[in-house]
Amino acid sequence: MISHGKEIKVFAGNSNPALAEHIAAELYRSLGNVNVTQFADGECSVSVFEPVRGKDVFIVQSTCNHVNDNLMELLIMIDAMRRASAGRITAVIPYFGYARQDRKAKSRDPISAKLVANLITAAGADRVLTMDLHAAQIQGFFDIPVDNLQGGHLFVKHFVNMFGKGNEDVMVVSPDVGSTARARAFSMKLGVNMAIVDKRRERANQSEVMNIIGDVSGKTCILLDDIVDTAGSIVGAAKAIKEVGGAKEVYACATHGVLSGPALDRINSSCIKEMLLLDTIPYPANRAKCEKIRYLSTASVFAEAIRRIYEEVSISNLFD
């Protein structure tokens, strides 16, 4: 029995409307009628033009660039739905911003991920649906249920179709020690071995020295990360794999393509043959197309998760 919401309603903010439309299409629905604009001074204005009383409302909004504007849009949309007596409100956040500030790395640091979790809960969300949180412990920052979907299986399908499963000439490479667990799980699904790029700065004002843990000589390597922001780390890791490790060719994939600053120029001029991203964040609208970047759609995964949340059945197999 469905205890919350008489009907699914999907609404979208301004951060990633294309993904929201594709999710709604997968659910055989049109997006809800809402207008999200700004007042002259930059304040967010939300107007909902259809009833949501008793409905199961899903608000699709990535907190990507411009992060603060998109976050405020999400919070105000949640508040509007709550005050309109929605039966249940799920914040669908394909990319959860501020996730990299999940602990105190040094004295007097904020824990911004916890603050954002508190804001979303206080606004009135009943649950959160997201993908590949930067740190798994962020789920514990919320006092409401959080479903953290994994995007890795979309990459697995792509590379299995390209190279086959268990190909001895292919290796998965973690770009740093912190991503080792993610890369290990990915390599097991592909049935291949794994290597790690070990970065360290031997002394102040000296460039990083990169060593490769594992033999990648003559291999086709697949770098896996969760976020590509300025692309410095993943491009540097690719260079090390080729120049230090002697790899044959390098592919890269990441769930969230933030692509800020010099990212596109770095990717274009790198030895990476193809950069695979998921569409949790749209390609920068004001930048020329980078031919090395290819996107895979997450719409079917989010749509299936929404369907299962509405029907109140398990979605655990979608996590992996």
Image (tube, rainbow, N blue to C red):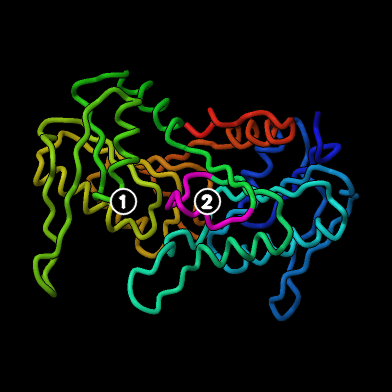
Picture residue at 21% right of the left edge, 29% below the top: 193
Quadrant in the rendering for residue 165: top left
Of residues 217 and 146, the one drawn nearer to the viewer in this rendering: 146
Which element type, helix, strand or loop, lies under badge 1? helix
Q: Which residue is mark 1?
A: 268
Task: Using residue 147 as the reference point, say whether residue 13 is left or right of it.
Answer: right
First in sequence, mark 2 or 1: give its number: 2
Instruction: Assess whether residue 202 is covered by the magenta stretch.
Output: no
Bin the neighbour count of mark 1 within 10 Å (Cα to Cα): few under 14, some 14-19, many 20 and up. Answer: some
Picture residue at 23% right of the left edge, 35% below the top: 221
- Is 129 above or below relative to 156? below
Of residues 66 and 80, the one drawn nearer to the viewer in this rendering: 80
Which element type, helix, strand or loop, lies under badge 2? helix
Quadrant in the rendering for residue 30: top right
> Quadrant location of the N terminus?
top right
Q: Nearer the viewer, mark 2 or mark 1?
A: 2
Q: Which residue is mark 2?
A: 139
Which amino acid type is marked by label 1? Asn
Which amino acid type is marked by label 2? Gln
- Is 143 above or below relative to 41? above
Rounded to the nearest angstrom, the CA distance separating label 2 from label 1 is 35 Å
Instruction: Assess whether residue 134 is covered by the magenta stretch.
Output: yes
Tell me, for residue 308, which label it has, or none.
none
- Magenta stretch in the rendered image: 131-143
Residue 250 position, x and y percent, is 24, 38
Of residues 103 and 28, the one drawn nearer to the viewer in this rendering: 103
Residue 204 position, x and y percent, is 13, 74
